[in-house]
Image: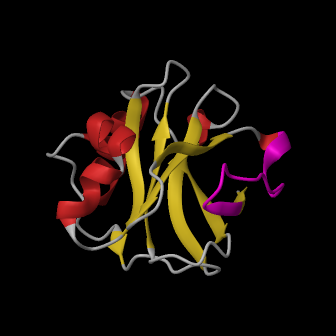
Amino acid sequence: MKASLTLLTAAAMLSVPGAAIAKPVTITAKLADYGGYPAYIAVYVVDKAGAYQKTLWVAGSKARYYRHLSAWERAAGRSARLDGITGASIGSGRSLTVHAELADTMIDAGYRIQVDTAYEEGTERPAEVAFPLEAARAGKPVAGRGTVQSFTVSF
């Protein structure tokens, strides 16, 4: 029985030649000290054509405000599965750290992590950060366009 289970497992692995191995990533966004209400933030992956692939995290627990994360909401749609990938909004000057897994095939293949931000009585910033998933950029911070002071992806 054990040999047949091993054979079935091997056959299943061979039948999916492009199966990707998951790579753990750590994403850190340090918000600027903008002095406003806590920000809603969507962190998601798009392919080289800009097509939505996957939501990694949404900071902000009230779904009625997701419409202010317009690029993400339009791309992910109202049917986006958000169970387990949401948390509280992030206050001015604070940091958000997200731990996720991405397929190895996304690295150096034109994919990028995008970050949309919005806060009450503030500005909505679609694609405030667009971080290319390139090995050479891993661990190197980039600046956002206003709400995000620095953004780093490590893998």
| Main SS of residues in magenta | loop
Position of residue 46 in the picture relative to residue 86 (left or right): right
Nearer the observer, 1 or 32? 32
Is residue 60 shown above or below 53? below
Determine the residue located farthest toward the front in the rendered image.
121
Residue 21 in sight here = no
* Image point (33%, 43%), residue name: 70
Q: Which colour style is shown?
A: secondary structure
* Image point (70%, 31%), residue name: 108
Residue 155, image quadrant: bottom right
Q: What percent of the width, then of the height, locates residue 81?
A: 21, 54
Q: What percent of the width, then of the height, locates residue 59?
A: 40, 69
Nearer the observer, 37 or 25? 37
Position of residue 131 in the picture relative to residue 127 (left or right): right
Residue 150, image quadrant: bottom right
Asked if residue 143 is among those painted magenta in the image, a careful observer would answer yes
Q: What percent of the width, then of the height, locates residue 77?
A: 21, 40
Position of residue 59 in the picture relative to residue 147 (left or right): left
* Image point (81%, 45%), residue name: 137
Magenta-colored span:
136-149
Asked if residue 145 is among those painted magenta in the image, a careful observer would answer yes
Is residue 115 shown above or below 84? above
Nearer the observer, 135 or 2? 135
Is residue 89 shown above or below 54? below
